[in-house]
Image (cartoon, rainbow, N blue to C red):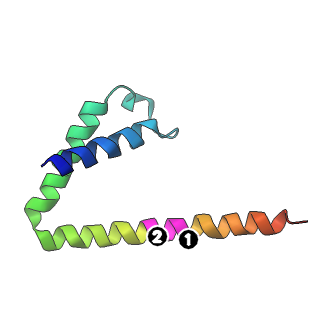
Amino acid sequence: MITITLSAADAAAHAIENPFAPSWMQGQEVLVTLFLVALLSIVFLLGFKEAIGIAVVLVAIYLLLNLVVIVVAIGHVAEHAT
């Protein structure tokens, strides 16, 4: 339970500090944390297999976005190399 709460609190802090976060999220750290804990609890209540499936999809999306960032960065470096 401590790990879930700390992970949700950390994720909420990152989400709120994001410059693209909506303004209504400012000052709502506890509410966002509670929402994330509830969401994670629902996922685990569905079953461990389903939680693993969701995690695999999220990791795949994360890795794909990292690949996009790396490719764009390499493109910028190649473009400005002199």
Identify the magenta region: 62-67
Which quadrant is home to the C terminus? bottom right
Which secondary structure is most common in the magenta stretch?
Answer: helix
Disc number placed over residue 63 in the picture, else none: 2
- Horizontal side of residue 16 vs 2, given as left or right: right
Residue 75 in picture, x, y percent from top left: 74, 68
Residue 41 in picture, x, y percent from top left: 13, 53
Residue 7 lies in the magenta-colored region: no
Number of marks in picture: 2
Task: Report the residue at 68% width, 64% height from top.
Answer: 73
Element type at marker 1? helix
Residue 57 in picture, x, y percent from top left: 33, 71
Element type at marker 2? helix
Q: Amino acid at mark 2?
A: Leu
Residue 81 in picture, x, y percent from top left: 86, 66
Task: Report the residue at 46% width, 70% height from top.
Answer: 63
Quarter-of-image position of residue 74 = bottom right
Q: Which residue bears the numbered disc 1?
A: 67
Quarter-of-image position of residue 51 = bottom left
Categorize mark 2 by other alpha carbons within 10 Å: few (<14), some (14-19), many (20+). few
Categorize mark 1 by other alpha carbons within 10 Å: few (<14), some (14-19), many (20+). few
Q: Amino acid at mark 1?
A: Leu
Image marks 2 and 1: residues in contact by CB distance under 8 Å = yes
Q: Is residue 25 above or below residue 67?
A: above
